[in-house]
Image (cartoon, grey):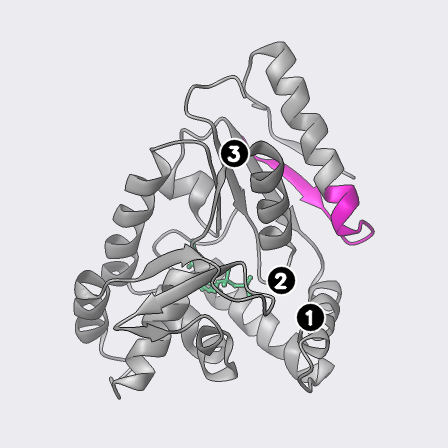
Amino acid sequence: MSSSLKIIAIDGPAASGKSTLGLNLARALGYLFFDTGVMYRAITWLAIHHGLDLNDAEALTKLAETVEIDIRPASQEDGRTSDIISEGLDLTWEIRRPEVDANVSQVSAYPGVRNALTQQQRRIGLRGEIVMVGRDIGTVVLPEAPLKIYLDASAPERARRRFQEIVERGETANYAEILEKIKKRDQIDSSRDVAPLRAASDAVVIQSDSCNAKQVFDHVLVLIEKMQTQHSRASTKSNDDC
Ligand code: CDP
């Protein structure tokens, strides 16, 4: 990577494959993988767990400003990529529950919640050698990242991938419901006032409907190699197929 910062920012809508790509890149490069979505999910789960009113922006902001969310190396081989711990509880799978899916976009739209979490994410990101995944990494959290990927796919394709993920975990899933929820989350994430979901002006946009995870990964590796040989940012906005 050309910049000494060595930061890869990956943004995109729900279930577009950001985490899979990010994790594979981090492993290949020996970087830290940081999925910022787990922080918004953990706040949402804790708020529900404590019986907070999810319309109370002040209470949720206070929770985000005070609670500690620990992301540690995976302690179990049950498909997790890391342990998500808070208040002494292992929330790794709790934060994937349907009630969190249904409410996380509302919680993450509050400016106070975003402010508290964004500051922590930026502090960690600036240490470098990191692949950070979310909705606003290239636009707000780490705009200086030398490589920004915006990974997209159509809603039906993303719903299909999420459906498969759930079934592979041995749980039951309903495709139509998943599609509807993904569309709703996209709509809230894209239309919020603070840090809405969008590609940074200098992001490489990858439309991944017809690509599998390996093809997307290989494509980004080529981009990284090009950047390394040209000693430049993967600057100009481009729309890439894989
Ligand atoms: O994995 P999936 O794409 O379903 O979602 P996620 O990355 O775990 O993020 C869950 C939710 O957190 C998103 O729908 C956003 O509302 C919010 N989020 C955000 O606002 N900013 C981020 N940097 C990451 C997640």
Q: What kind of residue is marked 2?
A: Ala
Residue 165 marker: 1
Q: Which of marks 1 and 3 precedes in the sequence?
A: 1
| Label 1 SS | helix
- Pointer 1 with pointer 2, Cβ within 8 A: yes
Where in the figure is residue 35, as x and y percent of width and height? 47, 53
Q: Is mark 2 within 8 Å of ligand 1?
A: yes
**Residue at coordinates 37% horizontally, 69% vertically from top-left?**
42
Left of 157 or right of it: where is 38? left
Residue 15 marker: 2
Q: Report the quarter where the C terminus lies.
A: top right
| Residue sitting nearer the eye, 226 or 129 | 129
Residue 206 belongs to the span the image colors magenta: yes
Where in the figure is residue 216, as x and y percent of width and height? 73, 43
Q: Is mark 3 within 8 Å of ligand 1?
A: no
The answer to whether residue 212 is above or below residue 78 is above
Q: What kind of residue is marked 3?
A: Ser
From mark 3 to mark 1, how far is it between C-alphas? 31 Å
From mark 1 to mark 2, how far is it between C-alphas? 10 Å
Q: From the image, tell me which residue sits under label 3.
A: 201
Residue 139 marker: none
Q: What kind of residue is marked 1?
A: Glu
| Residue sitting nearer the eye, 228 or 83 | 83
Q: In the rendered structure, which segment of residues is drawn in magenta?
A: 200-216
Q: Report the quarter where the N terminus lies.
A: top right
Left of 208 or right of it: where is 29? left
**Residue at coordinates 40% horizontally, 56% vertically from top-left?**
72
Where in the figure is residue 128, as x and y percent of width and height? 40, 31
Q: Which of marks 3 and 2 precedes in the sequence?
A: 2
